[in-house]
Image: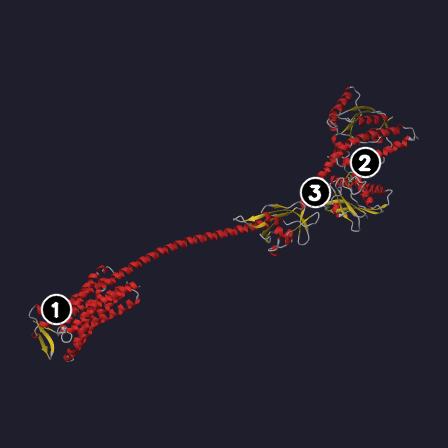
Amino acid sequence: MGRWCAYSWSGVKAGFSVLIPALALLLVDAGPALAVQTHGGAEGLVAHQLGHLLLLAACVILLFHSRRLQAEAGWRHFRLFLFLLIAWNLLTFVGHQQDEVIPAARFLWQDGRRVGMLLTGPIDFFYYLGRLDHLLLVPAFWFLWRAIEGWRRS
Amino acid sequence: MILSWLPVIWLDVLGSLLTLGLAVLCLVRAWHWRNAAREELFREFVVLLTVGFTVFAISRSVGHLIKQLLLFLDQPSLWQALSPYSGAVNSAAFIVAFGVSLSFHRFQWINDQLRRQRDRLEEAVVHRTAHLGEVNRLLEEENRARLQALQALADERQRLTVTLRSIGDGVITTDRNGRIVLLNQVAEELCGWPETEALGRPLPEVFRLVDHRSGQAVANPVDKVLATGELVELANHVAIVARDGTVRRIADSGAPIIDLDGQIIGAVLVFRDVTEKERLVEESFRAQKLESVGVLAGGIAHDFNNILTAVYGNVSLALRQLPAGQPVAELLEAAEKAIIRASGLSRQLLTFAKGGAPVRQIVRLAAVIRESAELALRGSNVRAEIKIADDFWPAEADSGQIAQVVQNIVVNSRQAMAEGGVLHLCCENFHGSPPGLGKGDWLRITFADQGPGIPAELRARIFDPYFTTKREGSGLGLAICHAIASKHDGTITVAPNPGGGTVFTLFLPAATGAAGAQAEPAAAMPRVVPHRVLVMDDEPIVAEVLRKMLESLGHLVTVAGDGAAAEAAWEQGLREGRGYDWGILDLTVPGGLGGLYAVKAILRLDPQAKLIVASGYADDPVLADPGGYGFRGRLVKPCRLEELEAIVGRAA
């Protein structure tokens, strides 16, 4: 029993060894964020993007280490969840970056509200698609739910 | 190209709601899954990971919904104020998810190890369970075998119990302290103790042994068995005294009970009632003794009788030839009386002779009994009171032998009543079973005297030959009575008289036919012409005296030494035309051809021959039935001249 506790504590310590510097970075270097939900101001785009990268890394790590578990119940859906979450992560990461560079003139406003967007090229179109990220996120969590159901049944 | 922003807004709201719902659902399900097996570390980890993702999803969805709501309410500035916090939470959730994911591999390895250990454990459990199953099966088989063995043991015990119960001998087993642990049914009967009461008691308390002659206690055999560990047999004359005081003679042996380790754990006694067997043995012994004495007496009496025959014949002839008034005649008459007494003794001895049988005829014994009793008491101070039933049945008996029995018993009674007394003699019919005999019609003759009686310890021996308590007694009287009664298919018993004295009871079988006429006094014999008589006897002195007696009767006598000589003489007489009128043939010729040979040979030559059998064995079957063997009559030696005259007559 003590052996398993030692293992679990070492994992937790490893997690904190990454978490604490990341939080410190966010607090020190927080900039404006103006994406789907802009992440500027007190939060800062860099810190948030760094979070996205960490999430991306987490998904890749999990995908790598769970490759042996595909045959087991729940894990196939979990991996699909990870794939979709990676896709969503890339999409939103790019979207956050575009928020920084896209001209305000691209958007149409009415009574202070955004009502349309002027597409001048593929980048604009990609930006527009990036606003529809729930098309990836909802299926991702649906697969997560299926994965948990699979684990429960097994 | 201008695209409407409205789909973006609606998808954002709808997607956030769906994501929020799914995230909450995942969180709840994951939490339940985790609670189902909280001890699984990897499950805990996966749930933690899921919590990280769902917290991110929830915070993001809530943030987007708040954003759309505030924008819809024209509050962009408020959203601008909240937005960093919402984003920061999302970022924090990303970092948490990353941090947790870093440990995924470690937790997975731990999980694999746990699984492997669990599998090994389960395999061990399965193996152990299978082993336990096999052990259980073996135990069940062993238990089944033990139950079968117990059943077999119970069956065997029941069989042994039934065997012990059924066995004809008494069986008692004891423990090493000599206390009773088993008593079978026969032992219960012989000891008079039920097993339930006898169990646990010391053996001598239940199994009491005495010497049946002295009544002294006999040592218990179990003590010796337990001390020596050897088989012990009881000495002779041992009897067991039952609880009610009954004494029975027993044969007994004791043996140790030895266990598998060779230790003596008790003793077993096997014994049986031999009272009846011992009685039969004693009776058989007595019969053999009587038979031996009979053979001896017969041999002696045969020779003695021949001598008496010669003496008697010569004295008889001398008395005939003496002129009347001679003083020597008295001497000869005294000698003749002595010879008659000696002849009586000889006849008594001959009663024992082997093969002797009474000359039985259907007779009424009343007169014989009365006369014999009165004769025996004549001149004594004992008076006889004789009661004879009016319908006293006849008997098929030798009246002479019965008279001898009566005389012997009466003389015995007279001697017992030396100071005088009354002898009660009762003759009556009896229908029933005398001691040791079958049911039927019997003559019961009882002799009850008033003497001192016979001690109980002597009562069983008084019929033994030569057993007597009187100085002048021969010891043959009662033995002869017993022999005569037995040869008449009857018996004689002795018992104490309730009023003092002794009672002898003679049982004789009643006859079914009519009694023969009483012998009439001999009438004067008619004179006959002189006969030619052939006398055959191996004893020269007997042959000589018979010759003289016959010649004194006026007959012509030829003498032959044995059967062959008699046959030759008869044949010669026939051939020469001067055949014999009578032949007197001795029955027994030691070492030669006797009367039975001669009668057959002579009858072959002359079927009309008149032949007389002569013998000192008055009880011989041939004399009892001479007609059955071809003879015309019998002559018992020694004989008087008158007896010869009654057979062949006196020549004119």
- From the top left corner, tell me how far across and down residue B83 is, in percent: 16, 76
Q: Give the amino acid at mark 2.
A: Gly
Q: Which mark is residue B629?
A: none
Q: Which mark is residue A94?
A: 1
Label 3 SS? helix
Task: Give how far apart the Cα atoms at labels 3 and 2 are.
Answer: 30 Å
- Neighbour tally class for label 2: few under 14, some 14-19, many 20 plus, Cα within 10 Å: few
Check the image and report above or below for B362 versus B614.
below
Label 1 SS? helix
Q: Nearer the viewer, residue B425 or B570?
A: B425
Q: Nearer the viewer, residue A105 or B247?
A: B247
Judging from the image, mark 2 belongs to the subunit labelled: B
Judging from the image, mark 3 belongs to the subunit labelled: B
Task: Give how far apart the Cα atoms at labels 1 and 3 are.
Answer: 140 Å
Q: Give the amino acid at mark 3.
A: Glu
Instruction: Residue at 78%, 37% (x, y): give it.
Output: B348
Residue wearing tag 3? B282
Judging from the image, mark 1 belongs to the subunit labelled: A
Does residue B136 appear anywhere in the picture?
Answer: yes
Mark closest to the chain's N terminus, 3 or 2: 3
Q: Give the amino acid at mark 1.
A: Val
Instruction: Residue at 18%, 68% (x, y): give it.
Output: A137
